[in-house]
Amino acid sequence: MQKTLCIIKPDAVKKNVQGSIIQMILDNGFKISAMKLIQLSEEQAKKFYEVHKERPFYGELVNFMISGPVIPIALEKDNAVADWRKLIGATDPAEADAGTIRKLFANSKSENAVHGSDSEENGIIETNFFFKPEEFVK
Ligand code: ATP
Ligand code: MG
């Protein structure tokens, strides 16, 4: 099965919609193989989003991601990367399809409720960023 990383972002945790998002994950056939509630440090957030460091929104993104607790979740499913991105919807909730997580719960293009890995390779790299081998259940 393919792996992908979900992060329930600070805006969604603050709104208390993390339970609804986890229910949607389960209802859509994903297996949760690791999950935790953490406060990211600035250093961790900068490292996780390093690919975006030249983008104008990098500083804003890092500050948002450390503005409160987040819930990283390792997901497994056939076609997990594409299926998870379909369920979360477009980056900007204004452009997200009806019924997607971002349409339902995101505030804006920056405060957009959840993260999803963008490739199979990054699904593995990003789940390993948050979880040690022994933290994944079989
Ligand atoms: P994610 O990687 O979080 O799943 P994504 O792949 O849809 O989102 P990316 O282009 O990878 O979008 O951007 C990473 C994150 O940076 C976005 O989810 C959003 O929080 C923030 N972001 C992206 N574009 C902008 C922008 N123009 N202004 C502000 N924040 C942005
Ligand atoms: Mg992305």
Image (cartoon, rainbow, N blue to C red):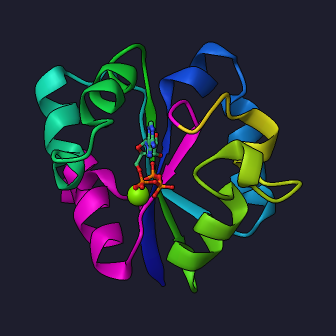
Can the viewer see residue 138 in this picture? no
The number of discs equals 0
Locate ligand 2 by image quadrant.
Answer: bottom left
Q: Is residue 135 left or right of residue 95?
A: left
Image quadrant of residue 103? top right
Q: Residue at x 57, y 77 (%)?
A: 82
Q: Is residue 18 above or below residue 29?
A: above
Q: Is residue 111 above or below residue 115?
A: above
**Between 92 and 89, which is closer to the camera in this rendering?**
92
Q: Which residues are magenta?
A: 110-138
Q: Tell me where residue 55 appears, x and y as whole percent.
A: 25, 46
Q: Is residue 92 left or right of residue 110?
A: right
Q: Residue at x 23, y 33 (%)?
A: 45
81 drawn magenta:
no
Q: Residue at x 78, y 54 (%)?
A: 100
Q: Is residue 82 left or right of residue 72?
A: right
Can the viewer see residue 49 in this picture? yes
Q: Is residue 40 above or below residue 29?
A: above
132 drawn magenta:
yes
Q: Residue at x 41, y 35 (%)?
A: 36
Q: Residue furthest right?
A: 98
Quarter containing the C terminus: bottom left
Image quadrant of residue 70? top left
Q: Is residue 21 left or right of residue 6?
A: right
